[in-house]
Amino acid sequence: TAMVQAVCAIAEQLAASGVSGFSGWLLVWGCYTGFCYLCFSTLLIPWFLYFFGYPTYEKWRFKTNPKYPSPTAVLGEIFMGVFLANPSVTFAPSIHLALISNGTLRHHCDTPLTWQYRFYSFLMVLFVVDLYSWAWHYCGHWIGSLWKVHRHHHHFANPTPFSTIADLPPDNIIRSLYMIVVNLASYCIMGSPVDVDVLYFVTAITIGFYGMYFHCGHELSILPYDNRIFNTSYQHYVHHALSYKNKPYYTGFVFKLWDDLAGAHYHGKQCIPAVEDEKLGNRTLERWETEIRPALPDYSVLLSPSFCWENWRHAVGLSVGPVDAAQKQSQSQSRGKAE
């Protein structure tokens, strides 16, 4: 069976419809954004419900921070990570797809339709996007002007899956320029772009699904925090809780390699993995029943329009004040965990 390129087939259908120019791009942007609302944002709901809507002792044993975020904090994640984020993360890719449709970048559909080239494209996208994501994230903690934008993401010190892409539009737009970065690298190596289907599929998996795992706040026994290759939700929790301006702990995404080379590790005792906390006797059933379970937040209020209207101005992440307050809160939560 001959291989096909789904992205290019969609672009050809758009071109056949006669819609082009600025209106054509607006159509692509709107459809792509709607697709993300329908698929990506909808997938966040079962992740959140599983870990936070229906918590159990067995799940809590693996939650890095034993405390649960307030409904107001989650409201901020929803506003920034769902309503505000999707149009910004699809902005640059929609321009790329529109340019393919109108013929300007039609050569991006002329790559070899072989498993070998798609495997090459897979490796290129996986490593280049991961390196680019790490570099941009790292700079976001070192360069003052970039930190002013990125710091809002760090208001979510005790994250849930809704904070996966809960960044301001400039951060999301620059981060989503992967089609430029990857194809530039591919042109340097092969003299041609990567397979366009692989480009979008791999970035959706790594940034989407791996990002949801990163922000779920719970560790997986099948992926220990101290493995040598892959970053885990523990590393990313430490990043949210303790990394701020000029202190870029664990800015990597999939691979630990980039943080290893940069020395961006955390060696303190303020934030420890849940598995290590359990060894200290802090994850007992008695603690769950007497301390944690009675204090579980009622997230059902997030379904109340009146609650959302009354509290959106106070939602964490939507404020424009300095991140210091959020950092103090996160450190307090971390100290509470250790205590």
Image (cartoon, rainbow, N blue to C red):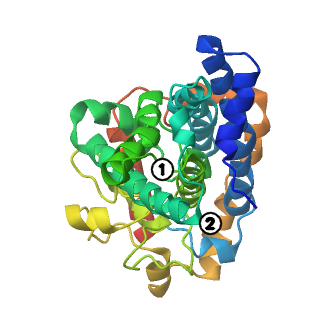
Vertical placement of residue 323 versus 45, above or below: above
Front residue of 173/333: it is: 173
- Residue 16 vs residue 216: left or right? right
Query: Mark 2 sits on what residue?
Result: 292
In the image, what residue type sits under mark 2? Answer: Ile
Front residue of 92/309: it is: 92
Would you identify the image quadrant in which residue 273 lies? bottom left
Vertical placement of residue 319 versus 107, above or below: above
Picture quarter with the N terminus: bottom right
Would you identify the image quadrant in which residue 115 lies? bottom right
Residue 227's x, y, as percent? Answer: 41, 80
In the image, what residue type sits under mark 1? Answer: Val
Q: Which mark is residue 118?
A: none
Picture quarter with the C terminus: bottom left
| Secondary element at image label 1 | loop
Mark 2 crowd level (few <14, some 14–19, many ≥20, 10 Å Cα)? some
The residue that appears at 36% across and 47% down in the rendered structure is 191
First reached walking from the N terminus: tag 1 or tag 2: 1
Query: Mark 1 sits on what residue?
Result: 194
| Measured Cα–Cα span from mark 1 to mark 2 | 49 Å
